[in-house]
Amino acid sequence: MSGALFPRPRAVVAPGAVHVPGWLTPDRQRQLVVACREWARGPVPIRHTVLPGGGVMSVQTVCVGWHWQPYRYTRTADDVNGRPVAPFPDWLLDLGRAAVADAYDDPAAGARYSPDTALINFYDGDARMGMHQDKDEHSGAPVVSLSVGDSCVFRFGNTADRNRPYSDVELASGDLFVFGGPSRFAYHGVPKVLPGTGDPGTGLSVGRLNLTLRETGLS
């Protein structure tokens, strides 16, 4: 709502880390919600991931292309129901390439980008994501993050540890965040979701969807 009155400029949060507000059109956001709902039904259903120490993540996750389980990728969801994950669709590949090209203002970088997996995280109003690195991939290609629904506080840190320095960025519905290059292995997390800030016109009446596209580097 406030975005119409006070436009949010794109920002380079750190070298290689770019925030592009309002990158997804309303139609594209609705399409993503429909697709995520379909993936959430299976063949591997959305779930709260159980960590090796017995902890349970507060976000709910479903994957396409490759299945992520702490801390590796597999083609079958051995920690859920043993079934192969849904395939990674060509239209999502195209969306990822467009995201990298636009974030870096570099069509060649977009053309080189070949994501083969997406992790879809659903946050209710109480869900959080602790500071972590995306380092289970065998590739240094950028990570593309797309947000739909409620806004959140996205904490983007340094590559050394979970502590300061870090920047808190508000990610709203439709926002794009890409991190690669020197920031590819920066710690990041979501300390807070802002309930009631999403637009029901997306088809998501409550909560936040986050899609992260990645190159696994696996064959």
Image (cartoon, rainbow, N blue to C red):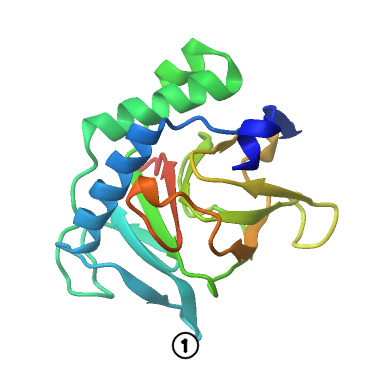
Q: Quadrant of the C terminus?
A: top left
Identify which residue, 31 or 68, lies in the foreground. Answer: 31
Q: Secondary structure at mark 1?
A: loop
* Number of numbered tags placed on the structure image: 1
In the image, residue 130 sits, relative to residue 99, either above or below, namely below
Q: Quadrant of residue 213?
A: top left
The amino acid pointed to by label 1 is Gly
The residue positioned 75% from the left and 62% from the top of the image is 162
Residue 84 percent coordinates (x, y): 16, 59
Residue found at x 80% / y 52% = 166
Front-lying residue, 63 or 124: 124
Residue 193: image quadrant is: bottom right
Report the side of 40 relative to 129 (left or right): left
Q: Position of residue 50 (x, y in %)?
A: 41, 79
Label 1 neighbourhood size at 10 Å, few (<14), some (14-19), many (20+)?
Answer: few
Give the labeled residue for mark 1.
Answer: 54
In this picture, is 135 found above or below 110? Answer: below
Expressed as whole percent of the image width and height from the top left, the position of residue 79 reads 28, 75
Can I make out residue 17 in this image?
no
